[in-house]
Image (cartoon, rainbow, N blue to C red):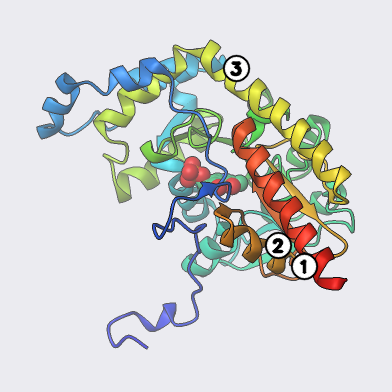
Amino acid sequence: MSKFLSRRFDTLDAYVPGDQPSDMQYIKLNTNESPYPPAPGVISAASEGEAQKLNLYPNPDGTPLIQKLAETYGVTPENVIIGNGSDELLAFAFLAFCDSEHPVVFPDITYGFYPVYAELYGIPYRQIPLKDDFTIDPADYFDTGANVVIANPNAPTGIALALSDIEAIAQSNPDRVVLIDEAYVDFGAESAVPLTHKYDNLLVMHTYSKSRSMAGARLAYAIGQTQIIEDMRKMKYSFNPYNVNRLTQVMGLAALCESGYFEKNCAEIIATRQYTEERLRKLGFWMTNSAANFVFARHPEFSGEQLYRALRQRGILVRHFDKPRISDFLRITIGTRDQMDAALAAIEDIMKEAANAQK
Ligand SMILES: Cc1ncc(COP(=O)(O)O)c(C=O)c1O
């Protein structure tokens, strides 16, 4: 135990990101990154000329980027805030809206950072069990008296809620914030951004980390009505006003100007997801109905741990969660078609080896 760390963090379990090992060359299907590089315009935007301006602080509001985001989503700049990844915006939201009188609820199986933020800030939280089929029952989130955080599509299940369900949840919690984390929305779910015009308690978060191939740049944004964004800005300006660096701001703006590239990549990933699902099904896997850039799969004859380890030995990294209800599953990020073929071949090989061992 550290003699320096504040005692209030003695029991804090920090978030554990997916492995980034360097012992060998892996096919990385474990952190839901895009297999495609950023759009060509994004790369050229990070020019030498921009790098030469790094002696100067960035625009704290990210004004040009926010203007373009507002235009893209049919809102005004006052309705948008940018952050250093959605992790930072989530940290601002938990800090801004939750306290001992205003707890937070989220599903028992969801993005692992939500309970970490609640613990970090000492916020009481309740984890609402997903149904047996891993879907969310919207009625569980009606009139909660608490702030609500839902990833849509959810992670690691990939299952999406209908917009009508999100609306009903926002409507039934008018005095608390309903945060919809749409990190994976571009891969097949419907965005709740249009509902922000109608509900002042709705805060919708998007990230550049997945569908826009910019996980390394750390950029995300949240959209909501003016007051809720003003509250978020209060956190940002009390924590780190220059939270999005210069290069990331220009790259983020350039990415929005190449919507064709973005749409093509999303369509490609959706098609590769369908292809992967079909092949996994033929190998005996059961999967949730994913609307994200990953599949969540279980095999009746192999434990999640067993498959995870055997794949890792073969140079394929996937994500395994050693947690109740989901320890039998693997979350496999959708990569390129070639990467998925390699992963599927490795799974076939593992199965063959197990069958031979039984003979
Ligand atoms: C549901 C969900 N929200 C947020 C994040 C964090 O995204 P970012 O890279 O923007 O911090 C992730 C990352 O995996 C995620 O799965």
The C terminus is located in which quarter?
Answer: bottom right
Q: Which residue is mark 3?
A: 263
Q: Which residue is mark 2?
A: 307
Q: x, y percentage for residue 352?
A: 79, 58
Tell me the mark number nearer the camera, choosing from 2 and 3.
2
Does residue 2 appear to the left or right of 300 in the view shown?
left
Residues at discs 1 and 2 in contact (Cβ within 8 Å): yes
Q: Is residue 103 visible?
A: yes
- The crowd level at tag 3 (other Cα within 10 Å; few <14, some 14-19, many 20+) is some
Q: Is residue 143 visible?
A: no
Q: Nearer the viewer, residue 278 or 100?
A: 278
Q: Secondary structure at mark 2?
A: helix
Residues at discs 1 and 3 in contact (Cβ within 8 Å): no
Q: Which residue is mark 1?
A: 303
Q: Secondary structure at mark 3?
A: helix
Q: x, y percentage for residue 98?
A: 55, 57
Q: Give the amino acid at mark 1.
A: Ser
Q: Nearer the viewer, residue 153 or 308?
A: 308
Q: x, y percentage for residue 333?
A: 63, 44
Of mark 1 and mark 3, the one earlier in the sequence is 3
Indicate whether 221 appears above or below 2.
Answer: above
> Residue at coordinates 73% horizontally, 59% vertically from top-left?
350
